[in-house]
Amino acid sequence: MGKLTHLQMLESESIHVMREVAGQFERPAILFSGGKDSIVMLRLAEKAFRPGRFPMPLVHVDTGHNYPEVIDFRDRRAAQLGEKLIVRSVEDSIARGRIVEKAGADNSRNRMQITTLLDTVAEFRFDALLGGARRDEEKARAKERFFSYRDENGQWDPKNQRPELWNLYNGRHNAGEHFRVFPISNWTEMDVWQYIEQEKLEIPSIYYAHKRRVAERQGVLMPISDLVPAKENEVVTELTVRFRTVGDITCTACVESDASTAADIITETAAARVTERGSRVDDKASEAAMEDRKKEGYF
Amino acid sequence: MDLLRFSTAGSVDDGKSTLIGRLLFDSKSIFEDQLEAVKGASRNRTAGEVDLSLLTDGLRAEREQGITIDVAYRYFATPVRKFIIADTPGHEQYTRNMATGASTADLAIILIDARKGVLPQSRRHTAISAMLGIPHLVVAVNKMDLVGWSQDVFDKIRQDYLEFAKSVGAKEPVFIPLSALEGGNVVDRAVETPWYQGPTLLQHLETVEVGETEVAAPFRFPVQLVIRPDLDFRGFAGRIATGSVKVGDTLEVLASGRTSRVKRIHTLDGDLQEAHFPQSVTILLEDEIDISRGDLLVKHGEAPNQVREFEADIVWMDHQPLRTARPYFLQIGSRLVRAQVSKIVYRRDIVTLEKRDAEELNLNDIARIRIRAAQPVALDAYDNFRQTGAFLLIDPETNQSSGSGMIAADQPHELRNVVWSASQVDRTAREIRNGHKGGVLWFTGLSGSGKSAVARAVEAKLFGRGAQTYLLDGDNLRHGLNQDLGFAPGDRTENLRRAAELAKILADAGFVVLASFISPLESDRAQIRRIVGDADYKEIFVSTPVEECEKRDPKGLYARARSGEIPQFTGISAPYETPKAADLVLPTHQWPIEKSVAAVLDLLDRKSVHPGGEVEGAGEGI
């Protein structure tokens, strides 16, 4: 009998976690941004639930600072799958006065989406949100559980996490509390790319090499646009780049690359000397930046 | 490329984090920005050079205190294998975290400081690794550079370790002399150890065989979900916990005991002919049988015993102590059942590993306990079934995962007899499912004495507790089963004989039967007792005297008997022989009915092996 490959092992574990969510929760949802990790999540959901429908809708919290290619892809993919997509936007939260946007060109909407996300949880009374976060992304995430408990304020208490043993996941909760569930916790960036290649998954074009105007800032290449104008003294050049993550425009840097296929990216990733989140400016603020945002309810 | 999960246990001083940092660093799994962050942090904490341990200590509290308090997961890969490291703290007060990391590990690395040798902590780590059934053990004798790479020191540690390892049932470990700080024998061979012929740590991690015992074990498949998009597809989704399954295999469903053959093994990538641990699949069966989340599919002929009471080893993980009186949820496989800890058999001293008596368990205690579940549980010993033999105890008030348990291979003798056999549904099986024993409460007394009133009230109470009950009285039998019988002495005896036989069948069916018959003759009652069986029979004499009964005369029978309309009426024109050996006497003319009802219930509760025993709480499932 053939041994499973590491991707088959990871896939089987993730499917198991997704099915536990469907079995244990009444109103789960799966977060889908159009980014590569959430694309992998949707394929895993197909593996877990087909030929049935997904027992949960797709949800996206739109910061309003996303690349149009990614938003188009998001809508197209949801339609292809025939699954329900719920979109709530940070813009709306600002318009309704739930959030006050801080001034300044460097200000990211990442922290602001916490409010919109928690409002969405309350609106639909979601009791579990499936997300594509991985433990290899960042040190605080290395200690995150598969089933991560959030109190009625949506907050994470890293020192008081439920122990998680074997493949037994305890999702019991009271009304108003919810869980964040991370089925691909044990995947690395390399695993994600290998899976995209293996499953021949379509991803938004900006993950592949394209020409873009960029400027070097804090050691990374920032794409220059209306939202992120060049600063004084910055040299803007057009380079062939790709994105390793496709979050908020204002805080997602790109890397120089010629990679035009998933296989190319795997080759590049194997040689990469900077972690994926290293291209995210928001984590650099302090050593414990991610831990602080997670405590507040960030994904 | 396959996957190996391993855990590391050790304290700060053992250099555990440094060892992991070394593995990541030398296998080139560390990115530049991580190294930069570590260099920055080393300066912040005014440490000297680059501290590799900072790569693994994730949470701020840990970085500030310089200790590892939670399990952190690390990933690296070599061309042949991907690795998942569960990096766990070594201190006594973090035993639960260690157990967490160990629970999914294929291999455990126990770190021993070459200068200090085998410490109580090493024993504890070994015992926990053994208890959690980690298949492979590596003893990394670290800081060999500080003892001049001495073979004598290494051999002494090996000898000391082996002496106690056997006593806790640990597997034969692989010993490796190394230096995490300098890197010798971690990834690259140390030039200082020509006397060591074994593999370096990474060589061993890359080549050790894993997953074979799980595939070879009997098939176990906890059903997570039923996938039913339309009438043509009804699939049972889950992950194979052990063993393998192929199309055509006859499977048995626990707890129902129903069987059917595998029609298809569905996956999104196409149907499989055969699947094995640890694949996630969807199984379709040939027959429409009732299966839902929580059921366990096994191969016919390989079904585990099903029991309501069993012993298990447990690591207590909650600040709230374990108490035997409290209710818990038992989460096992995909099932959730109510349970109670019926006793703490012993607590294991965390330092000396000796067995001690205990009234309660506190955070990080390790113990052997006895658990009573509200419904039967498949008894897979953890030694052979690392997934289906493991469970959580969840506090229903706080929802905390309070205890992590492992079903013991050695169940005590008195529990072995109480096996719930799914394929052979018998009285015991029914009684375990009901949560109480079957039996007969035989109410005897004059007409109008209040037998039926008390019996009805007792039935209402028992039924309210969730018990299976049935009220049998002379009148309703005479309308059907006994309608061919009259009131001649021979017919009366036959009437009671049939009633007794019926009561016996109902008791065997698991019911608490409340039989209300005048049954005036000692000889008839002796026959009834014989038919039902002494152990199941409780005789309750409702002792209201005839004068009182006649005064009540609810059905006007006494008046008709006095007038001679009814011949041979017990108490008037036929004798009532006072029972000599009644289990309970109820003077209902002196007692309010509540007192009589309480007396009957008390009789049941006191003699828990008799009818209705253990009924208490069955309604709430304990």
Image: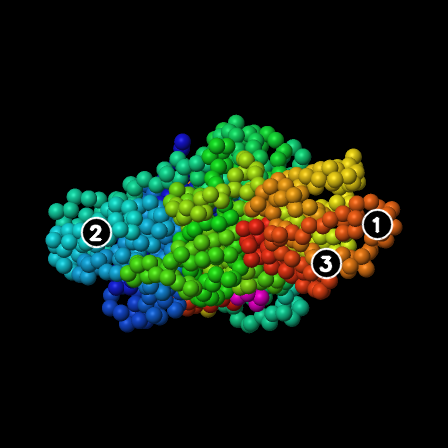
Q: Which residues are magenta?
A: A150-155
Residue type (three-letter) at the residue carrying disc 3? Thr
Name the residue nearer the viewer: B238 or A7.
B238
Q: Could you say which disc has been placed on residue B544 in the image?
A: 3
Q: Quadrant of residue B128?
A: bottom left
Question: Same chain for marks 1 and 2?
Answer: yes
How far from the left and from the top, in percent, is residue B547? 78, 59
Residue type (three-letter) at the residue carrying disc 2? Glu
Query: Which chain contains the residue that carries disc 3?
Result: B
Q: Is residue B620 magenta?
A: no
Q: Is residue B329 something that shows in the picture?
A: yes
How far from the left and from the top, in percent, is residue B571? 76, 52
Q: Residue at x 63, y 68 (%)?
A: A94
Q: Are marks 1 and 2 in contact (CB under 8 Å)?
A: no
Q: CA distance from mark 2 to mark 3?
A: 75 Å
Name the residue nearer the viewer: A96 or B87.
B87
